[in-house]
Image (cartoon, coloured by chain):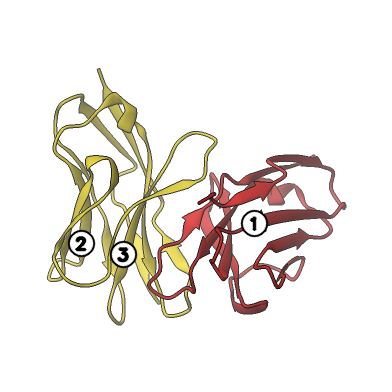
Chain colours: A yellow, B red
Amino acid sequence: AQSVAQPEDQVNVAEGNPLTVKCTYSVSGNPYLFWYVQYPNRGLQFLLKYITGDNLVKGSYGFEAEFNKSQTSFHLKKPSALVSDSALYFCAVRDDDYKLSFGAGTTVTVRA
Amino acid sequence: KAGVTQTPRYLIKTRGQQVTLSCSPISGHRSVSWYQQTPGQGLQFLFEYFSETQRNKGNFPGRFSGRQFSNSRSEMNVSTLELGDSALYLCASSLDGGKDTQYFGPGTRLTVL
């Protein structure tokens, strides 16, 4: 069965500094990987996905993610974090049964 | 295009009652999935419908059921509510599943008293 792990419950960074949110995955076939962000009392917003092709995927709001097959990782990155990036971030993998399996989530706090 | 809409946004029910939640997918999307989000269990998959057929189901008791209509709108029903059913219920739609991106609605916050 497919699964993802987000090893950090919380990430704290200063505004303007680089932001990295970690994700590792386990799949039996080709990985279809996604990142979503959730703001308080809101649904999930899609940021980016990896299906195939370039290992560096660019997404919404200046976010990007690097797919690393050898390390089975799909870390989310942003070169310069904003206070408005403070939210809950989820990594997910799509399995053969069409459902998304989510990580536990990482709370990002960007301080001014 | 309008996004995924869910109604109602908030619900308060008592134990033993039943509840029906509604989801309207993005126009043209034929796959609708439902997820339950709780602080303790995180995001868990309930079921997925495609062309009015349940294509996959998560590990939830039979009290949780759903259906999809010919216009792709979907409903989920929870019967005999328990306190532990209190959660944010999220609906997501995609073109036809598989590698397609799922787009989420704002959710329905269900509180069971």
Q: In this view of the protein, which residue sits in the foreground, B25 or A101?
A: B25
Residue extending farthest front: B1
* Disc nearest the viewer among 1 and 3: 1
- In this view of the protein, can residue B89 be seen by the observer? no
Q: Is residue B12 left or right of residue B103?
A: right
Q: Is residue A90 left or right of residue A71?
A: right
Mark 1: few/some/many CA within 10 Å (<14, 14-19, 20+): many
Q: Amino acid at mark 2?
A: Ser
Q: In this view of the protein, which residue sits in the foreground, B37 or A34?
A: A34
Instruction: Evaluate whether label 2 is on the same chain as label 1.
Output: no
* Mark 3 element type: strand
Q: Which residue is mark 1?
A: B24
Q: Which residue is mark 2?
A: A73
Looking at the rendering, in which quadrant would you find the C terminus of chain B?
top right
Q: Which residue is mark 3?
A: A33
Which residue corresponds to the image point at 77% horizontal and 59% vertical from the top-left? B78
Residue extending farthest top: A112
- In this view of the protein, can residue A76 be seen by the observer? yes
Mark 3: few/some/many CA within 10 Å (<14, 14-19, 20+): many
Instruction: Evaluate whether label 1 is on the same chain as label 3.
Output: no
Question: Which chain letter matches label 3?
Answer: A
Query: Disc 2 to disc 1, how far (Cα)?
Result: 34 Å
* Disc nearest the viewer among 2 and 3: 3
Question: Which chain letter matches label 1?
Answer: B
